[in-house]
Image (tube, rainbow, N blue to C red):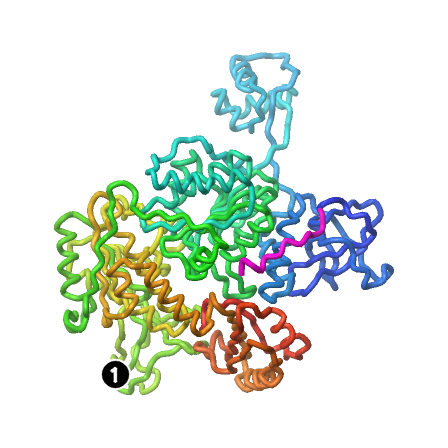
Amino acid sequence: MASEISTAPAASDDAIVSDTVSVLIPLALPKPYDYKVPAGMAVRAGDYVVVPLGSQELIGVVWGAGSGEVGHNRLKAIIEVIDVPPMPEVLRRLVDWVAGYTVSPAGSVLRLAIRAPGALEPPRLRTAYRLGDVRPSRMTPARTRAIEAAGDGFARTVRELAEEAGVSDSVVRGLVDAGTFLPVDIPTEAPFPNPNPDAQGVILSAEQAEAAARLRAHVDAAHFAVVLLDGVTGSGKTEVYFEAVAAALTQGKQVLVLLPEIALTSQFLERFEKRFGCRPAEWHSDLATRERRRVWRGVAEGRVPVVVGARSALFLPFPDLGLIVVDEEHDAAFKQEDGVAYHARDMAVVRASLGKFPIVLSSATPSLETVVNAEQGRYEAVRLHARHGVAVLPEVTAIDMRSNPPERGRWLSPVLVTEIARALEAGEQSMLFLNRRGYAPLTLCRTCGHRIECPQCSAWLVEHRFRRELACHHCGYSAPVPRACPSCGAEDALVACGPGVERIAEEVAELFPEARVAVVSSDNLRGPSAHEAVFAAIEGREVDIVIGTQIVAKGHHFPWLTLVGVVDADLGLENGDLRAGERTFQLLQQVAGRAGRAERPGRVFLQSWMPEHGVMRALVSGKRDEFLAREAAARERVALPPYGRLVGVVVSAPDAGLAQRVAREMARLVPRAEDVSVLGPAPAPLALLRGRTRLRFLVKAGRSVNVQAFIHAWLDGMKIPNAVRVSVDIDPYSFM
């Protein structure tokens, strides 16, 4: 993907000398529309404007001069230019690039960049007061103190002046009436603090210092470069790339740090504050609307030095971005599945290329795509081989469940139970990992065998015993657990099959009733504050046993956590997609990395029914590079990514017959092309999702094939009924 980056010039931000302009509107529209510029109105490329579209008035962005495709007398006029800095040229070029690469309407991509309600409205102001030249005719001790408090020239509110002077509000208001204090309008929003790049960080080891110097050199050179920061878990990658952040801040540049999940944010913010003296701005879906507006506008006006955020932060309007860091670059959460299907890591590389500045991809388990790019010289690799300080990598052991099975009705092997007991006796913490939310993944009837499925999806309902409900993790449908079987009516015949984290917690409570247990999953942690509270409790040794899903797998540092047990290490290998082995290895390696990150050595136990599997052998031996080499060779033999191209095309409709008719017609119209094959249509693994029947095509092509041109040649001009959706996913990560 990196070799396909184009840096062709875009429209400049100078005033457009034209009486028509093209305006891109954040709707599913393929290109900008032309509008007239009213006499006396100055318009620049990138300006946010209000324009009419049908009976509506919408906000759009000036994309350049008008195309001239429509006569001037037939054009509607721009209504208003919004008083906000124009969208930077580099961001407009990124919007066009992402639209072209993902085969998405440009307007849909623009919508990603205008997702802060109210950010384009004038900032709210409040009235404050400063000291003027007029003095009241009657002075009192209280008035004297108030005037002295305002003598520094700073504007303050009535309440602030009163509190500082130790007087009542009425004294201050009297001085306002007398003309002694003059009103001024000040912003209601708090300013953003400035991180101190010269603040003392942790003392780096020789290996870390060398890596940090290489990153700083790229920032100082102010050129485009992609650097893979590849370090074992606990090697201090964050502290190393903080030095690159410091270098960018010294140059007065803005910095973006992308994290895959909100759960990682709390500890990251604390580490950032410890290094730079203040917290960065945040950007993620759980931010309040007011804070999103504040951050968006602060970024646009250049008042935000550093943003740490989820993948959507990539589309913030940075006017002077000088560094991007993608932490945990391998994580699948960087892939946007719905709407515009893009990979934030790859698009971040494009953003850095367009802006001509460096990007750091950081991971203990880098993706195969990134590893191959480094091996082929497109990326530079910087390695950290040792953990920071006295910590050493944990010992990893596979528990063969065929010879060490759990007791009947339980899920933990006696070997793992013994190890948990040892950790508790030593005053150490344990973590049990199972990437299944809820109590049980399947509920069936012992009488007739009926399995309770989601009425809107081809998926089983997951029991959540703590909430006493069955839930679909694909569409959000939920219902109370029935007393009787919906199929045969037998009462008390429903049984939970398989374990989720809630069921493991139940077993742990029976085995270790005195232990303090925390269940960590997205079901019981809503929002950053909940994550922050539970992780603070773990770090403060208020928890003995942590039971969690992938939320606990990466980025966290718990000094007293010495034991990690993976309940079902084979779980990810059941997935049939091409990255199943790679993803399982990455996830379990990250989980294992939570153990022994301080003075006490760590131990990791993998419960597996097939410990001879290549993934399990690689985890136990620690031979990651050998595993990746085998994985790469297997994919190269069959020309799968990163040695070939894939495109997922899904046809969906509320009526199964309609979806099938459209899919058959699409199959008939597949164009002939060299080194391209189209598989399907076939029912998608999730053949029913949110009430829509889904059929899937998979396009397989050689690495040099322009798959976007092939998709356009196939789909452009096809008449798709309104009830049918055809979604395209270039470089798919999910095959559901």
In terms of image quadrants, where is residue 723? bottom right
Q: Residue at x 36, y 74 (%)?
A: 461
Report x, y in % for residue 504: 24, 64
**Residue 517 seen in this snapshot:** no
Question: Circle 1 — which element?
Answer: loop
Q: Is residue 56 left or right of residue 347?
A: right
What residue is disc 1 on? 446
Q: Amino acid at mark 1?
A: Arg
Q: Who is closer to the viewer here, 531 or 279? A: 279
**Residue 456 seen in this snapshot:** yes
Report x, y in % for residue 63: 71, 54
Q: Residue at x 55, y 41 (%)?
A: 222
Report x, y in % for residue 440: 29, 70
In terms of image quadrants, where is residue 506? bottom left
Residue 13 painted magenta: no
Query: Residue pushed farthest front?
Result: 376
- Residue 272 versus residue 129 in the image, above or below: below
Residue 8 painted magenta: yes
The main secondary structure of the magenta stretch is loop
